Image (cartoon, rainbow, N blue to C red):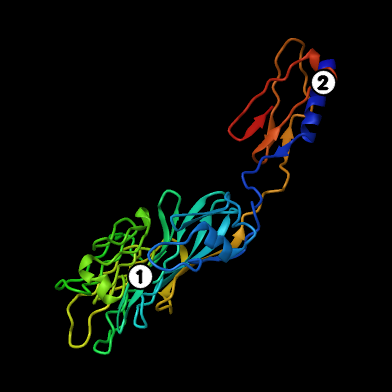
Amino acid sequence: MRTKKNVLAAFILAAAHLSLVSSVQAATYVFTSHTFSNCATTGQSGPTQASCRTAYSTTWDGNDSYFTVTGGIQSWTVPANGTYTIRAIGAGGAGAAGGNGASMTGTFTLTQGSILKLLVGQTGVTVGSGDYRYGGGGGSFVATSANVAIIVGGGGGGSGITSPSYVSSNGGDGSNNPSPANSNGGAAGTGSSGCGGQGQGGAGFNNNGTGVPASQAFTNGGTGGTGGSDQCPGTIGGTPYGGFGGGGAGGNGGGAGGGYYGGTGGNNTATGSSYPPGTGGGSYNSGTSQTNTAASNRNTAGSITITLVAETLPDTTPPTFTSADTFNSPENQTSVATIIASESATITIYGGEDQAKFSISKLTDSSTALS
């Protein structure tokens, strides 16, 4: 009966030491919603960490564990398990007749501690004096740290040359029709060489655009394109770079938009008093509850807005368990008792005041750890 008393004490103490082991942790920092921007940066290259910290001034962007910027691409650490909406808006193409970016919105389940890579598209560069040429807008990209696309808003195409002698139709808008099968770069426009030249193709998620030097894919850094030597930058007043995010450089024909796939540059061939603009870049959306439209942002940078909809909170409900409360244990023999927890738990068993007179074996099954 002495042994029986000790075993009973062990299981009574087990109840006091049953503790919940939950895989869901509290949020690492307070977060409700944030719009990631170009941080007041323009042109073919993206922002620096310093410029974004100045632009944001949140409670978390100053901590390298939560936010960094490398090569213009912003890396953000998800603060909590939960449901989020993400809206990615590609940059508009350069010029009053530049195309609009695409606005892509979806709902996503994100995991605490995972890192998202964010590239916010920038509008193309406008150059000239009297005669103006325009680069294409960059796409806005959200991807995992392993470069798997989550959502992409395509950039708008740049306007064709404008001057007292030339007008341009509107550049192509970034496509708001998700195209998961195509992540290629776009083609440059056609036509003869000469000062001005054709517009460059925009870059896609995985492949550069066409042109020398070409616009760069997201996976290659996303730099906007640079006009070729045939564009005579000294003569036309500068280089009409494509916007960061894979925008194609402009020429007489407009530069194309970057995106999940790249748009096509405008031709260096006039039709009457007009050179063609660039077309917009493609988009992608892997979320649920999608809303995909054209933005209204000609000649304007893109943005990425992330909003926490519902946090998956830690489970604070104590687990329950059942066990054999008494049993007879003959001396020098092994007896078995069972403890069943209602969920994953750590259970500590103490032997009581007479624990030296018997031993309790430690067992572990697929759901409960005994120690």
* 165, above or below 329, in the image: below
**Mark 2 surroundings: few (<14), some (14-19) or many (≥20) residues within 10 A:** some
Label 1: element kind: loop
Residue that carries the numbered disc 2 in the rendered image: 6
Q: Quadrant of residue 33?
A: bottom right
Residue occupying the far front of the picture: 234
Q: Amino acid at mark 1?
A: Asn
Question: Left or right of 82: which side holds 341?
Answer: right
Q: Position of residue 167 (x, y in %)?
A: 27, 87
Label disc, if present, on residue 177 of the rendered structure: 1
Question: Left or right of 255: which side holds 58?
Answer: right
Label disc, if present, on residue 158 of the rendered structure: none
Q: Nearer the viewer, residue 224 or 105?
A: 224
Q: Position of residue 16 (x, y in %)?
A: 80, 35
* 350, above or below 42, in the image: above
Residue located 57% across and 60% down the image: 53
Q: Quadrant of the N terminus?
A: top right
Question: Left or right of 184: which side holds 117?
Answer: right
Label 2: element kind: helix
Q: Amino acid at mark 2?
A: Asn
